[in-house]
Image: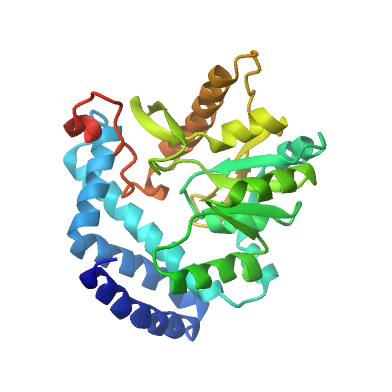
Amino acid sequence: MGGKTKLKHQIIYPLARLLMALLRALPLAWIPSLGRTFGALVFAFAGRERTKTLASIRAAFPRDFTEGQVTALARSVWVRLGQNLFEMVWWRGRARERILAQVVRTRGLEHLQEALSRGKGVLVITGHLGNWELLGGYLSKVRPLYAVAQYLYDERFDRIVTDFREKDLGMTIIKRGMALRGILSALKEGKIVYALVDQDTGQDGIFVPFFGKPAWTQSGVARIAEKTGAPIVPAFLVRGVDGRFECHVERPLPVPRTGDPEADILGTVRLYTEAVESYVKAYPDQWMWMHERWKTRPKGEDPSRSQE
């Protein structure tokens, strides 16, 4: 970590702790509007993040939106993200029942129950859409849930987030890099393994179409499903038209079993990427467009085409 980056982190952490303490002292009724305002301010002043958000939306919808609509959508993404962030800060340390009660509607939970009844555990996949943290906590009410997560850039923030996920939401966290043994053990015991599959990590992946463009996509879930026979169930937690949370659980994916493992893995990755894309299209203001989804390019392709 460079000197300037380290200094920035040393400044950000105490400021973030102060903000978290202030938010937790406020009435819940104030939190959503404060979060939306914060998100709007970030969009206005964080030029690099705003540029990435706009570029990703243009790449996904090259002919669907006017420039004004692209900007409005990008701003809405940050406004919703700010609200989610402030709400989760306020929830930290509150009773789990109160947190999970934020989910007021559920559709398709029987699909998860049916998949669990097969006795091989279930791989639940989702994306950075709506509130994926709350989704993990909500599904952990059905069966113990193990969530695969990356280490954060600052170990102090990593401890805060991990504590929130485990103590407040009821998940068990398995960190990437040491996840395989824990995942296989959880599935063998018939539990839920929860993974986000919509980011370009640059590792352990293959190219599949996402909004019509090759996107480097994590293949670990598909490889584990191939190895264990565990069903893959897409699930998402989004805000409905009334602004309240609703959980959508889809049918288990029809994972291909052709006898050609690599072809089957490719087919499975395509299936769960299509599931994510369908929800991003349905709720475009609730996905994290600031992530550079097409950053890694196929060998030999002009890098400048990544955001075309």
Point out the image quarter for the N terminus: bottom left
Q: Is residue 285 left or right of residue 195?
A: left
Image position, residue 59 (x, y; %): 26, 34
The residue that appears at 68% across and 64% down in the rendered structure is: 170
The structure residue drawn at horizontal position 70% and vertical position 40%, both measured from the top left corner, is: 122
| Drawn side of residue 277 relative to residue 254, left or right | left
Along the viewing direction, whichever of 4 and 42 lies nearer the viewer: 4
Residue 10 position in % (x across, y down): 31, 79
Q: Which residue is painted at 81% across and 34% down in the image?
A: 118
Instruction: Depth check: give the residue in front, 107 or 14.
Output: 14
Question: Can see residue 251?
Answer: no
The residue at the point 20 percent across, 30 percent down is 305
Identify which residue, 176 or 11, lies in the foreground.
176
User: Quarter-wise, where is residue 222 in the image?
Assistant: top right
User: Quadrant of the rendered structure where residue 5 is?
Assistant: bottom left
Q: In the rendered view of the protein, which quadrant contains the C terminus?
A: top left
Nearer to the camera, 180 or 232 = 180
Which x, y percent locates residue 300? 23, 23
Measured from the top left, where is residue 93 in percent x and y? 60, 78
Taking 252 as reference, is 189 above or below it? below
Q: How many marks?
A: 0
The colour style of the image is rainbow
Which quadrant of the structure image shows residue 104? Answer: bottom right
Q: Is residue 301 visible?
A: yes
